[in-house]
Image (cartoon, grey):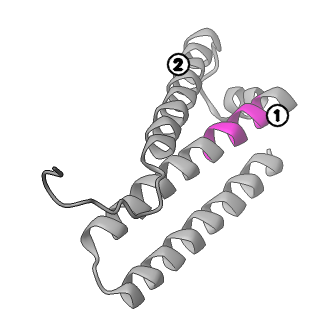
Amino acid sequence: MAIGARRLVVGAHYGLIDWLAQRVTAIIMIVYTLGIALAWWVVGDQGYDGWAGLFSTLTMKIATLLAFGALGYHTWVGMRDIWMDYVKPAGIRLCLHLLTILALAACAVWAVQILWRV
């Protein structure tokens, strides 16, 4: 004798992947922030020349791009979940997803421009 109705589980099934992505990107950003704080403490010159010298190395540029990539993906997962949870009309949700992607892509291009100018 079956008790209760059968449940059909639907959806994108990316709850665990999103949860893990949020944690991994948060750890990357924490490590980067601690590294920047340590560099600020160790580097005696906190003026423009000191910071420009710090960010002129390829290692620092790559670490910064990795941190910005983690920030962008972290933001995308969070905003996508907010739009999916709270915006019910599909057309509006699609527009918000598209605007979020465009804004994050523009920020990524801007970050690369800034880093390679130094």
Indicate which disc, 1 or 2, sits on the residue closer to the N terminus. Answer: 2
Residue 26 drawn above or below residue 80: above
Check residue 62 for magenta coloring. yes
Q: Which residue is mark 2?
A: 34
Image coordinates of residue 60 in percent, x first then y, are 76, 29
Image coordinates of residue 96 in percent, x first then y, are 43, 78
- CA gap, disc 1 to disc 2? 19 Å
Image coordinates of residue 77 in percent, x first then y, are 47, 54
Q: 39 or 21, which is in the foreground? A: 21
Disc 2 is placed on an element classified as helix
The residue at the point 57 percent across, 63 percent down is 104
Q: 1 or 69, which is in the foreground? A: 1
Q: Please identify the residue farthest to the front as the structure is shown.
A: 1
- Secondary structure that dominates the magenta span: helix
The residue at the point 43 percent across, 40 percent down is 19
* Residue 54 appears left or right of 69: right
Q: 103 or 15, which is in the foreground? A: 15
Check residue 5 for magenta coloring. no
Name the kind of residue labelled 2 in the image. Answer: Leu
How many marks overall?
A: 2
Q: Please identify the residue farthest to the right as the structure is shown.
A: 58
Whether pointer 1 and pointer 2 mark residues with C-beta atoms closer than 8 Å, the reply is: no
Magenta span of residues = 60-68
The label on residue 56 is 1
User: How many neighbours does mark 2 have within 10 angstroms: few (below 14), some (14-19), or many (20 or more)?
Assistant: few
Disc 1 is placed on an element classified as loop
Residue 49 drawn above or below residue 16: above
The residue at the point 71 percent across, 42 percent down is 65
Name the kind of residue labelled 1 in the image. Answer: Ser
